[in-house]
Image (cartoon, rainbow, N blue to C red):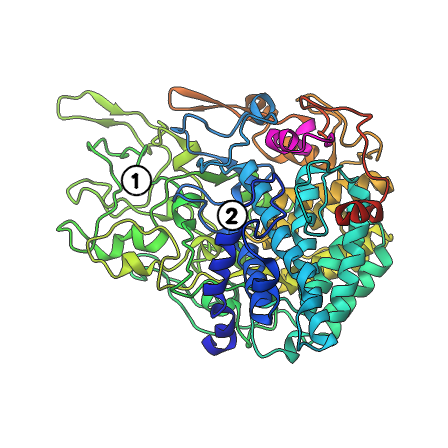
Amino acid sequence: MKSKYSKILKWTAPAVMVAMLASCSDDFLKPDPMSEFEPTTVFGTESGIQSAMAMCDRHLGRMFINMGNTNSIGMLSDLMFSETTVHAKTDDGTMRADWAGNLTPTGWMQTGNNSGGELGWVWNDMQDHVKYANTVLSFIDDVEGLSEAKKLEYKGRALFHRAWAYYNLTFWFGNIPIVTALPTGPKRDYLSTPQSEIIKMLVNDLKNAVEWVPAQKDMAYYGMINKEACRHLLVKCLLADGQFAEAENQANILIDQSGLSLMRQSFGTFVTQGEPQTWKITRNVIWDLHRPENKILAANKEYILGWVNVSEQAFQSMPWMRVLGPFYCGNITSPDGSSGQPINRYARNNGNYDVTLDWPRAVGRGIGVTRPTDWAQRTLWVYPGFDDNKEDLQDLRHNPAVGNWVRMEDMKYNANKKAKCYGKNLMLYAPEDVFDSEGKKIRTKGQLLCNDTIRSWFDIPNYKVYLFDKKNEDNRGSNDFQGASLGANGNVYIFRLAETYLLRAEAKLYQGNAGGAAQDVNEIRKRANAKYMYTTVNIGDIMNERARELYMEEFRKAELTRVSRILAMTGIPDEWGNTYDINTWDKQEGTDLSGGSYWYQRLVHYSFYNNPLYNNGEIKSGSKNIRYKMDKHNLFWPIPNWAHTGNNEAQLWQNYGYDGYDANCKMHATWQEADEAARN
């Protein structure tokens, strides 16, 4: 497998050169790749173009790695605006929970590396991605010695990269400025472009990319943009543009005519987890499918596009187990009244080490930066009226028996060998009254045994979160297993065929074919060995299945916003019978339970945000109350203040509900107009 993507990794050195040169620009959109160098000298050759393209490929994975510290992953900026995930690091002085009260064009938009993720970091990173794509598009025609077909191939890949960045940006930030060419001088008079026009541009660009970029079967290497990836992103944009029949047609081609198929049997390398004597994995297709070693692999017919992260020269750490796992070694007390922390992280060279209770290697050293909501870890897996309303633990994506899913009560106490609870399963509540030697009651039956259930008591989607940590595995004195580290494999999916099925289900549903949509959803469920199968579906069923299947793969907030736009365009009701208006879906304020967009309704029904089941978002954590609040206008994030101040010769759009909003702000009427302005 290594030789199949080794060529990509050889571009790392020149790509680093491009990155250094690119840093010279101080423009807020960073459009100038080399303000102090002669561009044609660097990019007048194919190797220069390859360097810029390698930087594009690198940016595909930036949301999955740490943002400069081990408490932060770029993707958290998206996930915390969904119904699946909330910030949980309760000792963080700037805990990202009350978005309604604190998200402004200047507040919580920092470009630093706060543990909550940074929206400003996301803005800048995606603008960088656009810059490198535009570098390829601006210089490729002048490279001598390349055939026209080869030039078009480079153009197609660059168009994909730019479309991927703008797709995410517009569903995070709404109406934004688009840059389609590198300016020849300082430019500070950008206008924003309406989201509807941005989507039309993406459809146009991706149609060209589908035509120009080779299929994976015609390529020698994996990890490069292929025709299938271009088509997959095209399907999303066609849906957003309301072209549902064409979206279904393109999905049909991808599913039925591209040599792809869902993986239904175990394959590739079986990578057992940490310490199997502590937590055993029974080999299964879902586990194999999500091992980094098996993601970008010829045998993986479900793979569409991935990000290569194996080179020791350019490896990026991925502290998923640290950030996404519970802080089980803190805030937990023993059921028998014994003193001290009852579950601990012992290194293998520690005298108290027990190989059957080695939780650091089995599930990692979690510190609870974020956590799944109760809905995501429990209610999502319950089907009303089916099997006595119990969670479907047969579904391999939610199955503790095979090791794919870890519940807190599956873990065991390991800190005090003399304690009665040693080696027994963790308990959230005391099972009985406990008295000390003098008859004083020290535990009351039913007493809560976790001082901070937000941060320290939640399930782990183990098959997604676990990553082999070679650095700490090689050190017997380590008890700090965080995730993929140097020398390990950190490959990630960008797209895979399971999502294509769910996108096709959407296309069918929007055309009135709920039964056909159910068939596509059921294909994913059959592969997962789920008990319950649908005979018909609504949009909520499809979005629920996405939550089950695509955790830590999809940008959940962006996809919820896309679907919100579609429901507002079409008037198609959601699962509760609500309908939305395209003229008002993004222009409402308030934290009450009614109105807003589909995105907002998902949050107030399923997340902690504003939810009456959780005291309207006020949740107690020890002696501290956490306020989980989201406003309807937080549907779109504010355009960062520095983007406005840097663009001082024209006014950029600011989203409704934030300082600077102006309903009469001038914008480009069409994407073609924006394209022409960017080139002049």
Q: Which SS class for mark 1?
A: loop
| Magenta residue check for 636 | yes
Q: Which SS class for mark 2?
A: loop
Residue holding disc 1: 329
Q: Residue at x 50, y 36 (%)?
A: 111
Q: Residue at x 82, y 25 (%)?
A: 664
Residue holding disc 2: 23
- Taking the image as shown, residue 213 lies to the left or right of residue 309, namely right
Q: Amino acid at mark 1?
A: Cys
Q: Is residue 72 visible?
A: yes
Distance in Å between CA atoms under marks 1 and 2: 41 Å
**Residue 211 at x, y percent in the picture:** 77, 70
Magenta residues, start to end: 633-652
**Residue 72 at x, y percent in the picture:** 44, 42
Residue 566 image label:
none
| Magenta residue check for 619 | no
- Taking the image as shown, residue 570 lies to the left or right of residue 323, namely right
**Residue 71 at x, y percent in the picture:** 40, 41
Give 39 or 531, whichever is nearer the viewer.
Answer: 39
- Taking the image as shown, residue 67 lies to the left or right of residue 431, namely right
**Residue 276 at x, y percent in the picture:** 32, 62
Q: In the rendered image of this protein, does residue 65 appear above or below residue 402?
A: above
Q: Amino acid at mark 2?
A: Ser
Which of the two labelled residues, at mark 1 and mark 2, occupies the earlier sequence position? 2
Q: Residue at x 68, y 36 (%)?
A: 188
- Taking the image as shown, residue 93 lies to the left or right of residue 474, namely right
